Amino acid sequence: MSNTLDDIIKDSFKVMTRSVEFAAALAIPAAATNIRSSNPNCLGFTLVNTGANPIAVSHEPNVTATTGVLLAANGGAMIYRYDRDFHLCGYPIYAIGVGGASTVHLMQIIADPYKAKEI
């Protein structure tokens, strides 16, 4: 029976995990920029536009306002999970501010086989 949050997460993902959260908001300029590198150990992530302008997001480095997925200002979000989005969880993420610079908050869940030794 699961007793702790680590146990529940391990039961769900079938592997030990760790969360990776950027301490500061990531700046999104009005030019395409890489905000997350590829990571085959990423099981899921949440990306929230915390800025005053919309952003466009893509797995392609040449993202534009018309080719990316638009995340609204002040809370537009994108959530990926391995069991719904498969390998896309590990792809890099590029973003561009639409109508001006913006900021995002990024939280990732990473498979961590070494964490099992700590618990």
Image: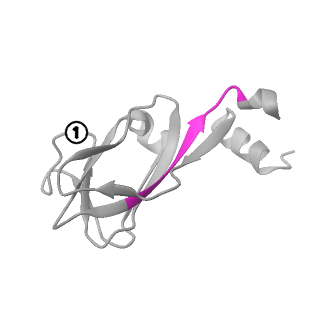
Residue 37 horizontal side relative to residue 68, left or right: right
The C terminus sits in image quarter: top right
Residue 50 horizontal side relative to residue 15, left or right: left
Q: Quadrant of residue 101?
A: bottom left
* Number of other residues with Cα within 10 Å of mark 1, as a class: few under 14, some 14 to 19, many 20 or more: some
Q: Which residues are magenta?
A: 104-114
Name the residue at 35% across, 62% down: 103
From the image, tell me which residue sits under label 1.
60
Question: Is 11 or 118 nearer to us in this picture?
Answer: 118
* The magenta stretch spans residue 113: yes
Q: Position of residue 15 (x, y in %)?
A: 67, 32
Residue 51 horizontal side relative to residue 40, left or right: left
Name the residue at 39% across, 70% down: 75
- Secondary structure beneath label 1: loop
Q: Position of residue 43 (x, y in %)?
A: 53, 38
* The magenta stretch spans residue 115: no
Q: Position of residue 8 (x, y in %)?
A: 75, 47
Q: Quadrant of residue 98?
A: bottom left
Q: Is residue 98 above or below residue 23?
A: below
Q: How does the figure colour the protein chain or chains? A: one colour
Question: Is 86 or 78 nearer to us in this picture?
Answer: 78
| Count of numbered circles in the view | 1
Q: Position of residue 41 (x, y in %)?
A: 52, 30
Q: Main secondary structure of the magenta part?
A: strand
What kind of residue is marked 1? Glu
The N terminus sits in image quarter: top right
Name the residue at 45% across, 31% down: 39
Q: Is residue 23 above or below residue 118?
A: below
Q: Quadrant of residue 96?
A: bottom left
